[in-house]
Amino acid sequence: SSFVASSRVALARVKSRASTTRDVRVRAVASPSLPAPPSLPVPDFIRGPLEEALKQVNAQLPADAKRQLLRAQYTTAIGLRLAFFLTQGVLSSRVSGRSNIDAAAAAAAVAKAVLDPRPIEKIADEDSNLGNIVNNAASGRELGEAEAREISQFLEQHIASIVDLFRVELAHLEEGTYKFPYDLNPATTPREQWEPLAVLKLASDTLEDQASVSKRRDAKAGQELREKFAPDPARYPAYYLQNFHYQTDGWLSADSARLYDFQVETLFLGSADTMRRQVLPYMSKWMDGKEEKDVKLLDVASGTGRFLSFVRDNWPGLDCTALELSPHYLEATRRLHARRFEGTDASAAYPNLGPLRLVEANCEAMPFEDESFDVVTNVYLFHEMPREARRNAAREFARVLKPGGKLFFVDSAQVGDGKALGMEKAFDQALERFPAFNHEPYYRDYSLTDLKALFGEFGLELEASTVAWVSKAWSFTKIAESAADAEKDDAAAAAAP
């Protein structure tokens, strides 16, 4: 198919977009990264010999045959995922009463992006008008031919960008850059992602909550949470006590944590995990040749722990710490990692599993010694922090990292990043409109922030970055002495008698 044929081309595009001259391709975790086989339902005394036999068969399979198996499983799994969350997105928009988008037109855009090898017809970037497109799509009225064509082209462009993201991931899997995602493999997918009643319950609860989200959006009630909690600088700063995304309870309930991942995947049509994983190639390159047990990793603002679960799946021997301000999301991290990495089957899959520590704390003042971690990871945090809080967090990242340590960072794309996809004006318009629609009060300022300069002030030097649809992955290295440290030393020297 054109999806498979262009996966290598997609990887080449990522490499050309990375802000570095270094090659993004890395030593294979396995080449290609085949999905893990299912656990065998046999007695223990013959389990070992059978698993060894399977390994021998796998070793004898030609590389091309392995790639065909990998491609078939990935394209099937990711295709079902995209279709499911596209359907959920259409239902969610209708529950909110804000959209009358034709689901058939959206499905046609998916089919065209996946199956049609010809370049899609694009809206000229200089002619893009996101406001008109959104208003026309949601109006419910009969559209003129030009209006309908503009909406169709808009859908096709963005669906094509998502499909291209999946092609990039497939290329990484074929190269063995990182492992086949465990939640796309039927043998290892968590129950809540495949068991019909569990999926139906989660989908139903999300749609029910969407009605509340819509009412909150109409009322501009983005600070409803402060009716239940008072700001406390020692625990919950004022900026944190908001209903980001207009979501129920903000970050401070077990139900919010339960629904969060499903809500985010619905928003991004099943591509959120894939966007997060686009920082793994940088991690894989850095981990090459290192002993996992000797590497201490801090995941800041772990949320429900999903990104960290992909990190540990690839490098299970790491000594990991998850820091999260919400006790409910931290508990979700504990449960996810207990299900994934503990128990009899997990012990066999991860025989040298490293520890995981859970820490409830604010990332602006982390309870760790200076230079105590080799790696810091951070995903989708900075766009929800005001400028000074971002600066405090950047300082803390640098403080706890050892010299030569790495910061692997993922967040929203910023102003100008759409140029990499040929949609600069459309992206910039979206970055301007999105904060008000989704209650993201610090998003616009984040989208204009010079992250290279911000992290550079504290000695974190940009090594590489790549745009992944509406997200961006970054890799930074801590240099020996930052500009801020140098200023302190100069001031101390000047004050000395």
Image: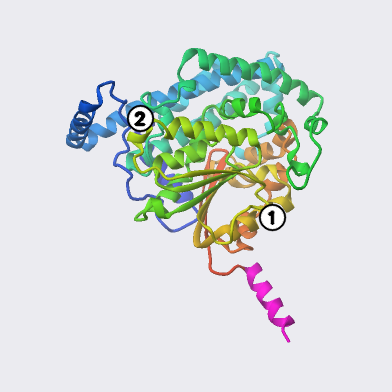
Element under disc 1: helix
Q: Residues within 10 Å of mark 1 (few under 14, many from 20)?
A: few
Q: Is residue 451 left or right of residue 115?
A: right
Expressed as whole percent of the image width and height from the top left, the position of residue 66 reads 26, 33
Q: CA distance from mark 1 to mark 2?
A: 42 Å
Of residues 45 and 465, the one drawn nearer to the viewer in this rendering: 45
Q: Is residue 348 above or below residue 442?
A: above
Task: Please state which amino acid type lies under the numbered disc 2.
Answer: Asp
The residue depicted at 76 percent of the width and 44 percent of the height is 237
Task: Please state which amino acid type lies under the numbered disc 1.
Answer: Asn
Quadrant of the drawing holding the N terminus: top left
Q: Is residue 144 left or right of residue 191?
A: right
The residue depicted at 54 percent of the width and 37 percent of the height is 305
Confirm whether residue 348 shows in the render.
Answer: yes
Of residues 160 and 212, the one drawn nearer to the viewer in this rendering: 212
Q: Which residue is tagged 2?
A: 345
**Magenta stretch: residue 264 in it?**
no
Element under disc 2: helix
Expressed as whole percent of the image width and height from the top left, the position of residue 16 reads 45, 50
Q: Which residue is tagged 1?
A: 392
User: Which residues make up the magenta segment?
Assistant: 483-497
Of residues 190 and 476, the one drawn nearer to the viewer in this rendering: 190
The residue depicted at 74 percent of the width and 81 percent of the height is 495
